[in-house]
Amino acid sequence: MDFYSQDQSSSTDENRVLALYQKVIEGWNKREADLMSEPFAPDGEMIGFDGTQFTGKTEIQKHLQEVFAHHPTPSYVTKIRSIRRLSHGAMILRALTGMIPAGKAELKPELNAHHSLVVVRIEEVWQVVLFQNTPAQFHGRPELVQQFTNELKTML
């Protein structure tokens, strides 16, 4: 992971940020809207794979409930790329992600994406203020799609 400082408080903060991301991913993979939306700040934002934006923990949770109720969602496979401090009370996590459709065993490269998670410390509690899911399609460069997918396969 990419860290600006290696002091004890920095390491603890990075672990907290990682735990928030893991909770978001666990919530998606378990299809539990409450679990996935729990780490978000009251005014947090989520930008989905298709570019749809949801603002506020309540709106995010409601959207996720609808998705999980009406769609067989694939499961995430993730690889942390970096966690770094932006300021004393703000950090960003970047991850590579792929998805395995329900009932399948292989990653579906068309669903590869970059995740960005921005967190801030509000009254000593780290909360997600932005989760963005950006497609990693590398249009016209199939070798990059394959490289990305191969890197994620190491996480299986």
Image: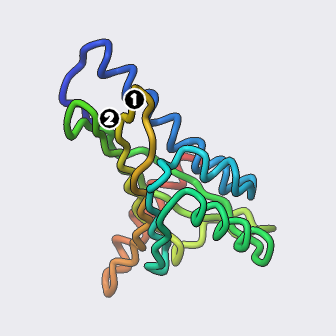
The residue identified by callout 2 is 1
If the image is split into quadrants, where does the N terminus sit?
top left
Residue 53 in picture, x, y percent from top left: 46, 74
The Cα–Cα distance between marks 2 and 1, rounded to whole angstroms, is 26 Å
| Above-or-below relation of 1 to 29 | above
Q: Is residue 7 left or right of residue 114?
A: left
Q: Is residue 96 left or right of residue 32?
A: left
Q: Is residue 8 left or right of residue 49?
A: left
Report the mark closest to the observer, 2 or 1: 1
Residue 16 numbered mark, or none: none
- Name the foreground residue: 37 vs 98: 37
Residue 31 in picture, x, y percent from top left: 74, 58
Q: Given the image, on which type of amino acid does mark 1 rest?
A: Glu
Residue 118 in picture, x, y percent from top left: 35, 49
- Name the foreground residue: 108 vs 122: 122
Precedes in sequence: disc 2 or disc 1: 2
Residue 123: which quarter of the image? top left
Q: Residue at x 50, y 55 (%)?
A: 152
Residue 78 in picture, x, y percent from top left: 52, 51
The residue identified by callout 1 is 123
What element does badge 1 sit on?
A: loop
